[in-house]
Image: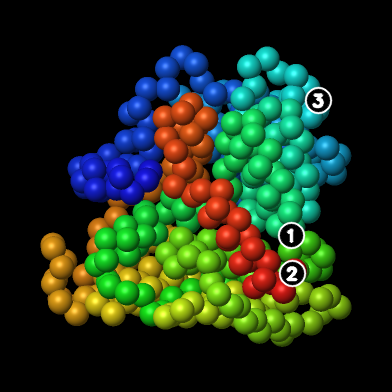
Amino acid sequence: MNRRDFTKISALSLVGVGLSGFALLKNFGANKIKVGQIGTAHSHAEEKYTTIKKLHEVFEVVGVVENDETLRQAAMMKPEYANANWITEEKLFSTPGLRAILVETDFPGLLTTAVRCINRGYHVHIDKPPGKSIDGLTELLNTARAKNLVVQQGYMFRYNPAFQLCIDLVEKGVIGEIFEVHGVISKKINSKRRKSLADTYGGGMMLLGCHLIDMMVKVCGKPERISTIRKQSNIRNDLLYDNELAVFDYPNSSATIRSTLLEVEGMKRRQFVVCGKKGTIEIKPLEPPKIKLTLEKPVGNYSRGINELKLPAVSGRYDEQLIDFAQQIKGERETEYSREHDLAVHETLLKACEIN
């Protein structure tokens, strides 16, 4: 879904047609997109795989690659990968008609794997965030552009209907000039994950905060300055930054993104708030999304005070994302998240994590 379709989709959802149902009304024809997946270690890997399997009108799944024997054996025991076709990377690359690959490796391997795929001529969905190098992402995007290939990043709120509506309201000036953005995205992790997360992501901002930084940059643009507070509040023989706050400075506004890995029931308190001089947009919780619009004066169909806005039903977190990926590959749609946006997000994220 993109904002051009939002009003139409919202109307359809009220009579029982969900987002994916609407998107799939477009005829992909008999020529489905052949797609494979490389990696099973990413936390979104299983759900991405089940999504492309579910979207059988759009994708033909040719196989899954997992180069790590231990990870492959573990994945084979999961119900999400029941009846999966386990193949080597070279066999995947040599599959006749293969067009696209989902990159779902562990975090350190995302960018290098995506580069291999792009160099072999395949469109790529790369999960988030794409490593710790702005130069590496720049090279990937430049190569893809030269080869006329799609690179879609796996930031999960780009297709969330509450964020879609939020962006639309901001762009139409409904809440006026923005002076503040506030985001919280936290959870509580078990002790077994701490060391591996410390060794890879480093902390909650890289792991989770990236999603809200993506939305913040979409709403406000690239910040001028960034300040950070990074705490190791629950040290257990690891170096995990489990309590982080980043402050983003704009000419006439500021934004804060907070992410901790210690908060009990933190997922229920996740929120994204945009304050303008004419009103405020509040998304809380983020999933399943609820959105409020508070206005100083009536605007269009919105009344003064608090408006609890209706959202279309969501059949799956990644349905619209991967349908959009397919439509970009087929040339039916251009992305609303440009190369410049992706680079601005990544540069902002790296600074928020104190990575130069």
Given contact means CB atoms under 8 Å apart, are the residues at marks 1 and 2 in contact? yes
- The crowd level at tag 1 (other Cα within 10 Å; few <14, some 14-19, many 20+) is many
Is 349 on the left-hand or right-hand side of 39? left
The residue located at (21%, 46%) in the rendering is 11
- Between residue 234 and residue 115, name the one nearer to us: 115
The residue located at (27%, 71%) in the rendering is 175
Labelled disc at residue 355: 2
Per the image, the residue denoted by label 1 is 132
Q: Amino acid at mark 2?
A: Ile
**Residue 180: image location, x then y, percent:** 41, 79
Is 207 on the left-hand or right-hand side of 90? left
Mark 2 and mark 3: Cα distance apart in space:
34 Å
Q: Amino acid at mark 3?
A: Glu
**Is residue 280 shown to the viewer in this render?**
no
N-term mark: 3 or 1:
3
Is 349 on the left-hand or right-hand side of 185? right
The residue located at (46%, 79%) in the rendering is 251
Is 218 on the left-hand or right-hand side of 237? left
Given contact means CB atoms under 8 Å apart, are the residues at marks 2 and 3 in contact? no
**Residue 198: image location, x then y, percent:** 79, 69
Rendered position, 175 above or below 168: below
**Nearer to us: label 2 or label 3:** 2
Q: Quadrant of the N terminus?
A: top left
Per the image, the residue denoted by label 3 is 90
N-term mark: 1 or 2:
1
Mark 3 and mark 1: Cα distance apart in space:
27 Å
